[in-house]
């Protein structure tokens, strides 16, 4: 067994997961290879399937295999013969781990997060909207990385907190080049597309941090930030819940569905959520980062807290 830590969880695994930090904490989650007896029977147009109960969830990916997640404590992986290890790990460290966190009561946001002077800030948006690229730009400016693509939040009306993920960013070659690095020096995440794995060997936050602000990425000709009132923030949050990757099945499962809506409402009413408009050009990243840093400083000053 290999021992790792991610999102505050000790993970014992039969598979090597080099993306994660090694750890020696008592295992909260065990990952093992095995046979999944109850596979999804309803498949979508891509041949993928999913089912969920209150305490279990199973995802089948065509050309990859099946992951069964139980009670937030166990992941059983049945890979298809010949599947590339990188592809298998992507399905474990994204969807399967998100289901573990969901079963443990965390709100899992499709977002990347970095550390600010007074907590964590998250950038949320759909696939291809530049969450990882923006997080990488902040990381290059001295902000520690907290999580990429999958941000886990412990929601509380008093102070919601962000759990540290693992020290890796997923970046397209042009984003890597904009940081002054050679894309070909970094490993490909998947054999069929050119996205790269950039490990944050320095500047990764291992701390649980208060959630200071969530920025919803939008597109426009100029860089601007627009505060969202709670009712708009709620509408903005809901489609970026990571669970929607599985369709609406998780929202049909009893108490967890109720808890999801309660968590959305709590975040919308207690956390600053803002729309970040910017041109989707790598050359604009510096202006975007400076505007966000200034925005955070003004917000902190407005709260009457002395830095």
Image (tube, grey):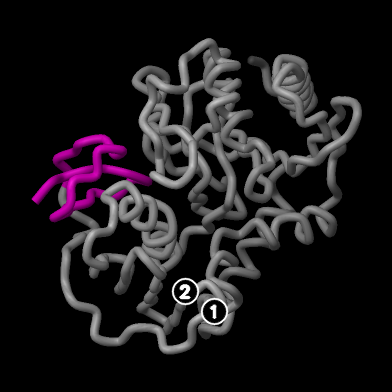
- Asked whether disc 2 touches disc 1, contact meaning CB atoms under 8 Å apart, the reply is yes
- Asked whether residue 248 appears in the rendered view, the answer is yes
The residue singled out by tag 1 in the image is 44
Residue located 34% across and 21% down the image = 201
Q: In x, y percent, where is residue 289?
A: 70, 20
Q: Which mark is residue 72?
A: none
Nearer to the camera, 67 or 290? 67
- Asked whether residue 301 appears in the rendered view, the answer is no
Residue numbers of the magenta segment = 1-25
Residue located 54% across and 38% down the image = 210
Name the side, left or right, on which 4 lies relative to 51. left
Residue located 30% across and 73% down the image = 70
The residue singled out by tag 2 in the image is 48
Residue located 77% across and 31% down the image = 280
Name the side, left or right, on which 36 lies relative to 207. left
Q: In x, y percent, where is residue 272?
A: 73, 41
Q: Quadrant of residue 174?
A: top right
Q: Is residue 6 one of those drawn in magenta?
A: yes
Look at the picture and state if 32 lies above or below 233: below
Neighbour class for label 2 at 10 Å: few (<14), some, many (≥20)? Answer: some
Query: In whole angstroms, how far apart are the C-alphas of marks 2 and 1?
Result: 5 Å
Q: Quadrant of residue 247?
A: bottom right
Q: Spot the residue most to the right.
A: 221
Look at the picture and state if 216 lies above or below 84: above
Look at the picture and state if 206 lies above or below 33: above
Q: Is residue 109 one of those drawn in magenta?
A: no
Name the side, left or right, on which 193 lies relative to 68. right
Which quadrant: the C terminus?
top right
Q: In the structure shown, which secondary structural element does the residue marked by tag 1 occupy?
A: loop
Q: In x, y percent, where is residue 176?
A: 53, 22
Q: In x, y percent, where is residue 28?
A: 23, 57
Q: Quadrant of residue 73?
A: bottom left
């Amino acid at each position: 067994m290999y021992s790792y830590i991610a999102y505050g969880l000790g993970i014992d695994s039969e598979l090597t997961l080099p993306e994660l930090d090694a750890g020696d904490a008592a295992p909260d989650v065990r990952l093992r290879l095995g046979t999944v007896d109850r596979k999804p029977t309803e498949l979508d147009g891509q041949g993928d399937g999913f089912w969920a109960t209150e305490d279990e969830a199973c995802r089948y990916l065509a050309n990859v295999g099946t992951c069964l997640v139980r009670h937030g404590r166990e992941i059983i992986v049945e890979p298809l013969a010949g599947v590339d290890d990188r592809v298998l790990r992507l399905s474990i460290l994204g969807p399967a781990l998100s289901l573990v966190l969901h079963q443990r009561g965390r709100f899992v946001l499709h977002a990347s997060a970095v550390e600010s002077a007074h907590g964590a800030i998250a950038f949320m948006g759909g696939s291809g909207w530049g969450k990882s690229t923006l997080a990488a730009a902040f990381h290059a400016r001295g902000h520690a990385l907290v999580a990429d693509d999958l941000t886990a939040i412990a929601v509380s009306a008093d102070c919601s907190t962000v759990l540290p993920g693992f020290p890796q960013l997923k970046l397209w070659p042009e984003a890597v080049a904009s940081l002054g690095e050679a894309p070909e020096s970094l490993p490909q995440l998947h054999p069929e597309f050119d996205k790269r794995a950039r490990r944050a060997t320095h500047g990764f936050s291992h701390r649980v941090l208060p959630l200071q602000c969530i920025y919803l990425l939008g597109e426009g000709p100029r860089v601007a930030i627009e505060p969202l009132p709670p009712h708009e923030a709620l509408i903005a949050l809901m489609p970026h819940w990571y669970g929607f990757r599985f369709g609406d099945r998780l929202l049909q499962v009893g108490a967890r569905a109720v808890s999801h809506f309660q968590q959305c409402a709590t975040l919308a009413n207690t956390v600053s959520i803002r729309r970040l408009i910017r041109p989707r050009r790598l050359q604009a990243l510096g202006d975007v980062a400076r505007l966000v840093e200034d925005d955070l400083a003004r917000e902190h000053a407005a709260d009457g807290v002395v830095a």
